[in-house]
Amino acid sequence: MESDFNINKLVRPNVASLKPYSSARDEYQSTGNSMIFLDANENPFPTNVNRYPDPQQRYLKLELGALKGIFHEHILLGNGSDEVLDLIFRAFCEPGKSNVITLPPTYGMYGVLANINDIENREILLSEEFEPQVEKILQAVDEQSKIIFLCSPNNPTGNSFSEEKVREILQRFKGLVVIDEAYIDFSEKESWLKKLNEYPNLVITQTLSKAYGLAGIRLGICYASKEIIAILNKIKPPYNINELTQESALDRLNSSEIVSTEISDILAQRERLFKVLHEVSFVKNVFKSDANFILIQVDDANKRYDQILEKGIVIRNRSTQPLCSNTLRITVGTDKENSELIKVFKDISK
Ligand SMILES: *Cc1c(COP(=O)(O)O)cnc(C)c1O
């Protein structure tokens, strides 16, 4: 199976033959000491950001690589995972010709990016248990199918997909399998990172926007084979990760104890909300979550959404998504925020 996989057949021909832009900092890498830089038309007077950032983010990749046990050549960074996902589309999908497969209800960006790039999006619903329907997915595949997107833990349902099902897709599909692990740090399940060497078609995306508390700096991460990363590197904007983002990310990665404490706290709060929400009369179902949010099914989602909003709490109504009628998605907040939420739920259930 694996030997059937050929990255050169998958990449767009124009990308394969592309000569990437070569920036000043690509042509001379700063070694930090005593050089006089007159090559990039920067203003020489120092602010803390008068110089262009490192286009390859070497320090950040070394730090991330050490943390995750991954060599830096397997890492590409993006301006949020949304940029990473867009790069994957543009490197591998031929507008008006290729197709991708997504599994609703799931993260909306895969479909939006497919539309922007003029790529057909073949939607194969998850099962009632919110699991991938492997046979149906593989039946939808044809010669033009380039990517299957799996979001695990899945947004908005919160569950992780069964390992066997993911494995089967990885083994039987000849295109790329992108596993979006935006919520992996809240899950007891293992990341697919350790399987990178086993599956040449595996691409994993993660982000600092959720567990790492840095949604505002925009840093998304892609892990894949060296070959796939090299292709994405060719088409990424030269300085896509700005200096301030690189610095904030490094700081945060060096504070892993604080991050772990916050995650434990959020997990304890998730457990608390899970129990309490079960007891609310208008809540019909509380779905098990491996993420930092909980999906609930209620009697009348529009009515409950409005009532909760009126009390000053903004949650997400997910009812228009398939398999999600009358559902609300609630992000786990602080102890105090969750106490407020619980109070509001009790008040409006009277
Ligand atoms: C929040 C989220 C992301 C994060 O996107 P960024 O651009 O990195 O902020 C990615 N995938 C899913 C499924 C998400 O819910």
Image: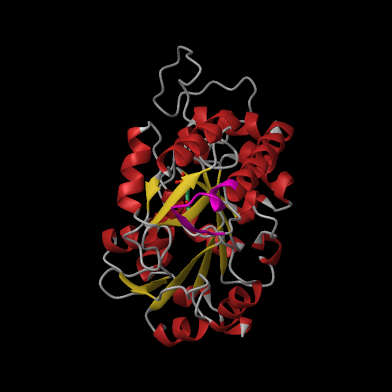
Q: Which image quadrant is residue 162 in?
A: bottom right
Task: Name the residue rendered at 37%, 68% in the picture.
Answer: 93
Foreground: 233 or 281? 281
Task: Name the residue rendered at 65%, 44% in the picture.
Answer: 267
Q: Residue furthest front?
A: 350
**Relative horizontal placement of residue 135, taking residue 315 as reference (left or right):** right
Q: Which image quadrant is residue 122 in?
A: bottom left
Residue 113 percent across, percent down from the top left: 33, 58
Membership of 284 in magenta stretch: yes
Foreground: 198 or 237? 198
Q: Which image quadrant is residue 229 in?
A: bottom right
Residue 138 percent across, percent down from the top left: 47, 84
Q: Magenta stretch?
A: 276-287
Residue 109 percent across, percent down from the top left: 37, 56
Q: Residue furthest top?
A: 45
Q: Is residue 89 above or below residue 132?
A: above
Q: Is residue 20 above or below residue 119?
A: above
Q: If the image is split into quadrants, where does the C terminus sit?
A: top left
Residue 288 percent across, percent down from the top left: 58, 59
Observer able to see residue 182: no
**Relative horizontal placement of residue 48, taking residue 18 as reference (left or right):** right
Observer able to see residue 266: yes
Foreground: 286 or 40? 286
Membership of 89 in magenta stretch: no
